[in-house]
């Protein structure tokens, strides 16, 4: 038995040592944000360059998922807020496809490391996302990876594996001088435009799905469990903003079929800060949707004009 354990240890120790070595490395951020090339219209490359390389200020930052990416026309909002305030206000939409507060947190950490935004606008939808973002492990430092062991993070082991993969590829690339593509990050702003108009059947199906979802009864205990991971990171984001002397504002961007005038966690959000609620006519017009969950360019224009008005009022009256 002792001989068998020794043999197991002989083979296991180098593996354990290799894993420890890999986790001791944090890939260069240029590498990390380019590693996910092809994701979300190469938005990660643009976010990297806007945070790390651009010498432009970042006064107002929008952070969220694809709803933000497709609804927040940062160039339009920047122009209108600057006009209202009679000074240049720099705005950037860092919305990144698919929900997950953990990836938004690690991006926001980098924002405050290199920029000093006065206002952080955090997207909220009908409900908080329940799971970790699949791209989070590729952008997270080792400490953030291990600290994501929050009950209930269903993707924790998967995150650790992805963290090992990118560190291995980073070291391999450094040794053999393998270069990632520079990525398409030439755009001045982060808005992802589309002129598509959603098929009416998609909107109807989404409305039916939401009716079914809202009719499901869940215990308070189960709700607290499924929201724990997301609220953990949302609290960290709010704390990060406040510690840096900036202001949090929430922006409610709902889907086409939910018909919820306020998010389910409205009381939770409003206990922290203001929530921008957009006019119902934007959401109720089927011509404003590119699909069941995202506004098209026409809808985004209407939404962004209202967002600019709401932000200008808050910035000027602060």
Image (spheres, rainbow, N blue to C red):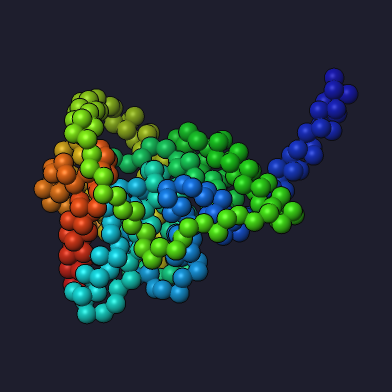
Farthest residue, direction left = 281
Hey, which quadrant is residue 196 in on the image? top left
Q: Quadrant of the N terminus?
A: top right
Query: From this viewpoint, is residue 105 visible?
Result: no
Q: Nearer the viewer, residue 280 or 313?
A: 280
Q: Residue furthest bottom?
A: 86
| x 60%, y 54%: residue | 180
**Residue 223 shows in the view:** yes
Q: Is residue 12 above or below residue 233?
A: above
Q: Nearer the viewer, residue 268 or 81?
A: 81
Most extreme residue toward the top is 1
When asked about the image quadrant of residue 112, the answer is bottom left
Residue 64 image position (x, y, % from top left): 35, 51
At which x and y percent is residue 49? Answer: 48, 64
Q: Quadrant of the C terminus?
A: bottom left
Identify the residue at horizontal 23%, vertical 32% (top origin): 202
Work out whether 86 lies above or below 289: below
Residue at left offset 52%, top offset 56%: 183
**Closer-to-camera residue (189/245):** 189
Number of numbered labels in the structure image: 0
Residue 17 in the image: above or below residue 59: above
**Position of 307 compared to 239: left or right?**
left
Q: Position of residue 45 (x, y in %)?
A: 49, 57
Q: Nearer the viewer, residue 191 or 23?
A: 191
Residue in view at x 40 percent, y 70 percent: 116
Tell me where residue 315 appears, x and y as whole percent: 23, 70
């Amino acid at each position: 038995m002792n001989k068998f354990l020794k043999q197991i240890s002989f083979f296991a120790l180098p593996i354990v040592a290799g894993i420890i070595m890999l986790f001791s490395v944090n890939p260069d951020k240029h590498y990390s944000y380019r590693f996910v090339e092809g994701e979300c219209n190469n938005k990660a490359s643009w976010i990297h360059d806007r945070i790390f390389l651009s010498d432009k200020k970042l006064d107002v930052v929008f952070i969220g998922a694809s709803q933000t990416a497709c609804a927040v026309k940062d160039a339009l909002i920047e122009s209108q807020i600057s006009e209202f305030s009679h000074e240049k206000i720099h705005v950037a939409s860092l919305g990144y496809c698919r929900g997950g507060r953990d990836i938004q947190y690690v991006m926001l950490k980098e924002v405050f490391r290199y920029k000093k935004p006065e206002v952080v606008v955090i997207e909220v939808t009908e409900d908080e996302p329940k799971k970790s973002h699949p791209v989070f492990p590729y952008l997270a430092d080792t400490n953030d990876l291990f600290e994501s062991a929050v009950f209930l993070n269903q993707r924790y082991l998967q995150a650790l594996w992805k963290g090992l993969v990118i560190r291995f590829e980073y070291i391999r690339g450094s040794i053999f001088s393998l270069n990632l593509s520079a990525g398409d990050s030439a755009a001045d702003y982060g808005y992802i435009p589309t002129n598509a108009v959603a098929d009416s059947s998609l909107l109807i199906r989404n409305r039916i799905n939401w009716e079914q979802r809202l009719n499901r009864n869940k215990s308070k205990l189960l709700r607290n469990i499924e929201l724990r991971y997301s609220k953990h990171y949302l609290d960290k984001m709010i704390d990060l903003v406040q510690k840096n002397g900036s202001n949090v504002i929430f922006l409610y961007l709902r889907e086409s079929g939910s018909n919820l005038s306020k998010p389910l966690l409205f009381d939770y959000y409003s206990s922290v800060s203001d929530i921008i609620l957009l006019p119902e006519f934007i959401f109720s017009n089927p011509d404003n949707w590119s699909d069941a969950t995202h506004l098209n360019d026409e809808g985004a224009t209407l939404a962004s004009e209202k967002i600019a008005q709401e932000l200008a009022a808050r910035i000027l009256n602060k």
